Amino acid sequence: MSNRRDDARLTVSRHAATLFLENGLAETSGAEIAAASGLSERTIWRYFASKESCVEPLFLSTALRFHTKLRQWPRNVSIDTHLHECCRLDDATPQDMIDGLLVVRLLTRMEAEPALRAVWLSASHQVEQDMIDIIADRLDRSKKDFDVRLCAATVAAAMRLIDETISIAAIEHGQQFTTEQIAQEMAQAIRKASTLPICDPIAPNVFGVSSHSSP
Amino acid sequence: MSNRRDDARLTVSRHAATLFLENGLAETSGAEIAAASGLSERTIWRYFASKESCVEPLFLSTALRFHTKLRQWPRNVSIDTHLHECCRLDDATPQDMIDGLLVVRLLTRMEAEPALRAVWLSASHQVEQDMIDIIADRLDRSKKDFDVRLCAATVAAAMRLIDETISIAAIEHGQQFTTEQIAQEMAQAIRKASTLPICDPIAPNVFGVSSHSSP
DNA sequence: CTCAAAAATGTCATTAACTGACATAATTAT
DNA sequence: ATAATTATGTCAGTTAATGACATTTTTGAG
């Protein structure tokens, strides 16, 4: 799934995020990111289209961890149960924890750094595209179906909002969260946001034909 | 509501959009945008933080027209009826039509131009913030209420998706739409997406107290 | 209307983001 | 092993973007 290049990009992403958090976006140069990453500046610009987008792999990697969990979501399990189960046997590595903290801290800077928000929104758009696949699979519908895409959009929006809200509550208001709490908030929000019945167990299709109307 | 500077920015936005559509983003320079707008390049960079963001006022101005309509949405009218009514007595100027077409054409280029999508997503985020106000007012709830913000996020996502879908259908598949059709699609999508009962007439608050739980 | 304060714009120099061209190093595959 | 491919580095060059300061335009008080 991931190659050497993606790993290198993620490493750069961590260094860039750290520098952005320490000194701000405007006060961090491409040369500094390159130096911190042990790469030439030219390579940085081959990896990324702009300075800000250096943090995108970080956003996407934490999103990917969640995506992987949703991919394993069995059809006969509710979202609440599944996410609760997932957080019980959480496979987060120490690196994942560090990355998560970087993301959370970046999210609290979006108000001050509009360029960061643009990158975050792009990452959320990628999450939305991934949700299309998950929902289409779960409901046995086409990925082109407007209602599938609408549901993906609303659910992705909910996930984004939970991430933002929890990050701000944690960093700016010092609120503490357990993994269970986050899973529960996330499940609730997804449930409220979903425009198709994806959150509860899917009735098995005993006739072996797809459940939606016409061919 | 709008000042001279915003008007100037919008004018630049139109020229920039036209150039982007004609020659592509990479092949359009800041100097060209300045020349086409009859301004110095320095002023362009005072107006905009980046080349791509030159098109944002165009996105926001069409969004603003819709926002104005939603602001006039009476509490005792459903979203479907209101939007249908709005499109009947549509106040679109010729300039509005031209701007709308520019936006629609830009939206079809997002696949090829990721930077354009980032700007579009930023504009949609602004729409989301505006929706918070509209929903909070309509339901007589706080703008900080998570459920209000969630509803704003899902509804804004639906509006964005309709815009994108209709644009692509119109430009890339030559499909024709009447204003009524668009209003109807938009109303349906908003209805499906809304996580709070905003779409149907709001029961009048006969006791003169807010309908949500505590002070 | 007048004229001074303030705000917007222009000019020019400078920085820093980003690209192209080509050489070198590292991987891959045969 | 080594040829082919691919990734990275070096360096020069372009262009997006900013700072400093002069000039014009707008605003507003008298």
Image: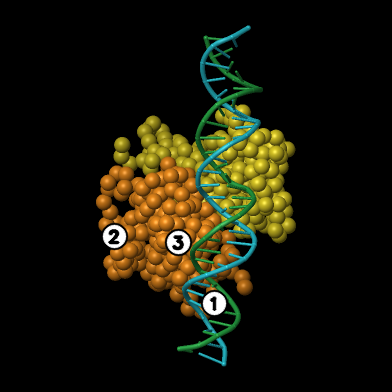
Chain colours: A yellow, B orange, C green, D cyan
Which residue is nearer to you in this view: B19 or D5?
B19
Chain of the residue under label 3: B
Q: Which residue position is annotated with label 3?
A: B39
In the rendered image, residue B152, in percent from the top left (x then y), is placed at 50, 60
Above or below for B176 versus A58: below
- Mark toward the start of the polypeptide (2 vs 1): 2
Which residue occupies 48% across, 78% down? Answer: B206
Label 3, label 2: how far apart the Cα atoms are: 39 Å
Q: Is residue B68 visible?
A: yes
Which residue occupies 64% across, 53% down? Answer: A26
In the rendered image, residue A187, in percent from the top left (x then y), is placed at 58, 48
Label 2 secondary element? helix
Q: Are marks 3 and 1 in contact (CB under 8 Å)?
A: no
Q: Are marks 3 and 2 in contact (CB under 8 Å)?
A: no
Label 3, label 1: how far apart the Cα atoms are: 54 Å
Chain of the residue under label 1: B
Q: Amino acid at mark 3?
A: Leu
Chain of the residue under label 2: B
Which residue is nearer to you in this view: B26 or B107?
B26
Q: How many marks?
A: 3
Which residue occupies 58% across, 64% down? Answer: B145
Per the rendering, the mark at residue B180 is: 2
State left or right for residue B206 relative to residue B85.
right
Q: Which residue position is annotated with label 1?
A: B209
State left or right for residue B147 relative to residue B95.
right
In the rendered image, residue B183, in percent from the top left (x then y), is placed at 33, 59
- The crowd level at tag 3 (other Cα within 10 Å; few <14, some 14-19, many 20+) is some
Which quarter of the rendered picture does the C terminus of chain A lie within? top left
